[in-house]
Amino acid sequence: MLLHLKCAGLRCAGLAAACWLVSCGGGPPAPSRISLPDGFQPEGIASQGDLIYVGSIPTGAVYRADVRTGSGAVLVPAATGRAAIGLKVAGGRIFVAGGATGQAFVYDADTGADLAAYTLAPPGGTFINDVVIAGDAAWFTDSQNAVLYRVGIPPGGTLGGQEAVSALSLTGDFQLQAGATNLNGIAFTGSSLVAVQTGTGFLFLVDPATGVTRRIDLGAETLLDGDGLLLEGRTLFAVQNQLDQVAVVDLSADFTAGTVRVRLSVPGFDVPTTIAAAGGHLYAVNARFGITATPQTQFDVVRFDQP
């Protein structure tokens, strides 16, 4: 769903024609919505080139679609005992946060083959919510505990075993909120981690070497109901799921402060949870939390432009 630009009539018409030629290459425009399988119950989204990957919460399945055409298919089949919450794609692999299973899963991004499974925490009292790739490691948030989990990614492409897993206790400004959703979406600045606390709307900068956290100063603003994060340079896109919006935050050079520039309420949002960039656009998953999902319930991904 495209945001509107304000400009003079002739100039705007010229821009629209130019955009048609550049984005479409003479063919039909990319779809503004991408349908997922009925009953899929999605949450996480990741991208690689013009492909997006969307995970199914209750089944662990992963759906892959081409944003240029909207066509897609299930790449990773549903599996008993698995779940898919946040996910990221890097180096030809899909890294998946396993929610209440306490696990992380890794799949081949081309074939969907099962590559690895890691136990991050015992099931019960944990919720592995999101993941980001930061150099030589995948970092996972836990929405019920003051900890991040690290899965090392060895050079040379061979994944390690359970010994690759370590836990990083969080100290500093972050305070665990009992009975609430704590750390959720996570991003990487190039040296530090950024994570949002859903229940408070606070944004934190995390030192991956020490676990020391520092609350990022947003002035009087918060990111309440913050979910998936996408960091592009110093611009942070933060999905606020129950508010049906995406906050666009301009961060300082040292990432210790930020200004909420705008909050996007895009037509078609229905409790969006996570966000990814592909094909020059942004894509958000509609999780539709609050409804009673059936095998016939429809789910989709919404396309929109960066402001």
Image (cartoon, rainbow, N blue to C red):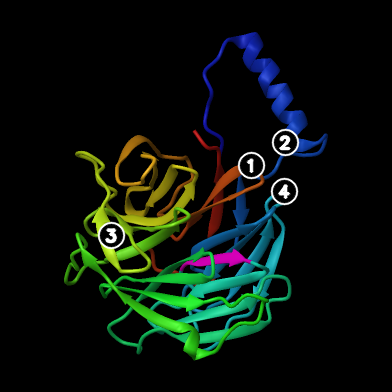
**Mark in front: 2 vs 3:** 3
Q: Quadrant of the N terminus?
A: top right
Numbered circle sitting on residue 115: none
- Whether residue 154 appears in magenta in the rendering, the answer is no
How dense is the environment of label 1, judged by Cα within 10 Å: few (below 14), some, or many (20 and up)?
Answer: few
In this view, 119 is above or below 286: below
How dense is the environment of label 3, judged by Cα within 10 Å: few (below 14), some, or many (20 and up)?
Answer: many
The part of the image, by quadrant, that contains residue 92 is bottom right
Residue hosting label 1: 280
Q: CA distance from mark 2 to mark 3?
A: 36 Å
Q: Nearer the viewer, residue 104 or 204?
A: 204
How dense is the environment of label 2, judged by Cα within 10 Å: few (below 14), some, or many (20 and up)?
Answer: some
Determine whether, in the image, residue 128 is placed left or right of residue 305: left
- The reply to whether dot 3 and dot 1 touch (C-beta < 8 Å) is no
Q: CA distance from mark 4 to mark 1?
A: 11 Å
In x, y percent, where is residue 285? 50, 56
- Whether residue 89 appears in magenta in the rendering, the answer is yes
Residue hosting label 4: 68
Disc 4 marks a residue whose amino acid type is Arg
Q: Specify which label sits upstream in the sequence, 4 or 2.
A: 2
- Kind of element beneath mark 3: strand
Task: Specify the principal SS of the magenta part.
Answer: strand
Residue hosting label 2: 23
**Mark in front: 4 vs 3:** 3
Q: What residue is shown at x 61% (from left), y 63% (from top)?
A: 53
Q: CA distance from mark 3 to mark 1?
A: 28 Å
Q: CA distance from mark 1 to mark 2?
A: 8 Å
- The reply to whether dot 4 and dot 3 touch (C-beta < 8 Å) is no
Q: What residue is shown at x 46% (from left), y 40% (from top)?
A: 266
Disc 1 marks a residue whose amino acid type is Gly
Disc 2 marks a residue whose amino acid type is Ser
